[in-house]
Amino acid sequence: MRHFSGTAVPLAMVVFIAVGISCSESSVLGEDFIDSGNFEVTAIDTISLKISTIQFDSIVTSNTGRLLIGSHNMEVGKITSESYFNLTYESTLVIDDTYQFDSLVLTLPMDGYVNRVPDEGVHYTIQVHQLSNDLEFRSTGSLYNVSEIDGVEDDLRLLGENTIYVESDRLATVSITLDENLGQDLYGKLVAGHEIFTLTDEFQQYLNGFKLSIAEDPSGFIGFATDSIKMTMMMSDKSQSPPEVVEYDFVISGSPHYSKIQTEDSIDALAEIEDIYDESLSNVTDDIAYIQAGSGYAIKIDLSNVRNLLLDDHDFIMAGAELKLSWLQTGDNEIPETLIGTYINGDFVDVTGENYSLSLQHDEDYNRDNFYTMDISSLVNVLLEPLTDHDYYLLIQTTEFNSTTTSIMLGDQTYDSELIIYTISNNE
């Protein structure tokens, strides 16, 4: 078994809503279970389950390959993301007084992730501040969406900004010319062969680190590829005729970095929850559960009541179990094609070591995709074993849960979500 907290630390918040079982005449899975013959399929309608919204205390947002910035009023509340990073040098450059400093430029290539950016595009003013205290990894070697850096906000120094036009279907590389005083001071230390260019720790303590954000109150989120971010010292070698341009790069490459993702003005049912043992029934949350990547909100489905299906008639055999979860959409929310499910116990330990896919399906009656399906036969079979006395749950998240702000709302039985248990009986 593997412990699920490899990407998230213990839980702090939970909201419960009910989901029921109902009879169904058709299924995405049903025809795959039973061959033609002397058998009939029966849908069982005697189980009640719970679907809940939980929130991780924190999730790792360093080492995800992305720095995320932006803000938007999401379904769970207002989400704001700012990113922090430090840099190091790739190699030592030996220069002399024939070189001349020109500029210090930060290059930020977008990695293709955009979310809630208006269709017509939007102007973002991207700012870079120098931190007033050293940015360091925690003792775990990671940084989290809720990590606070002591003294960081006390005396931030604006180094530069650039206004760009962002569209959801177009990549861009942002270049920001940084404060000349920082560039000149860094250049002077490079010429002098200062120890910061021989000791990485000294160099990072000199810089402290940087904060990357969007000015004012933007609508939408954009991501930047951490392995392509660089700060370049632009110089001219005057010993050449004409003077030769020399570039000296500083990169993240293992340096501390993370996205700080905050939730404000949460909906009442989430804001009032104090710990994992609190519950808020469906009439409080309008029959909805929430997944909010980046903020740590995920969905947990209680499957323990499946044991009520224990059958003493040996002519009945369980053929399969299918979970169907209806989704709800707001005007600007893109529905992900796939969700990720993990089987866990009450201590949030992954009991199988595998992830399972919940797939968006097409409802021909309404000519639209409006539910996710998942074959949970293997777990239901375990739960139906007479000697099984453990509680098991299905934890549902989005893909890239730690590095995006993807969101999804799933409804309970009020929105036709259901667990369908198929049994077969021999009619001979």
Image (cartoon, rainbow, N blue to C red):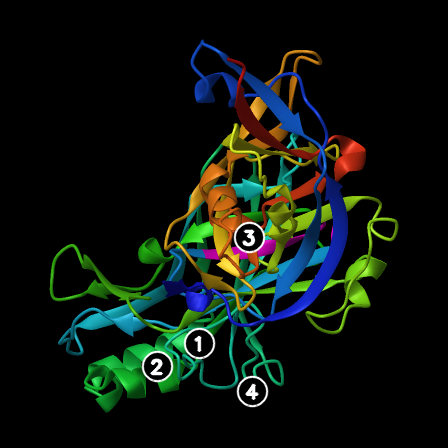
First of labels 4, 1 by sequence position:
4
Mark 4 sits on what residue? 150
First of labels 3, 4 by sequence position:
4
First of labels 4, 2 by sequence position:
4
Which amino acid, by three-letter code, is at mark 4? Asp
- Queried whether the magenta region covers residue 186, the answer comes back as no
Q: Are marks 2 and 1 in contact (CB under 8 Å)?
A: yes
Q: Nearer the viewer, mark 2 or mark 3?
A: 3
- Give coordinates of residue 179: x percent, y percent: 47, 71
Q: Is residue 279 above or below residue 224?
A: below
State which region is magenta.
67-76
Looking at the rendering, which quadrant does residue 25 occupy? top right
Mark 1 sits on what residue? 209
Which amino acid, by three-letter code, is at mark 1? Gly
* Residue at horizontal 48 percent and vertical 51 percent from the top: 342
Instruction: Judge the density around disc 2: few (<14), some (14-19), many (≥20) Cα neighbours within 10 Å.
Output: many
- Queried whether the magenta region covers residue 71, the answer comes back as yes
Q: Secondary structure at mark 4?
A: loop
What label does residue 395 carry, if any?
3
Instruction: Judge the density around disc 3: few (<14), some (14-19), many (≥20) Cα neighbours within 10 Å.
Output: many
First of labels 2, 3 by sequence position:
2
- Give coordinates of residue 223: x percent, y percent: 49, 50
Residue 309 seen from this side: yes
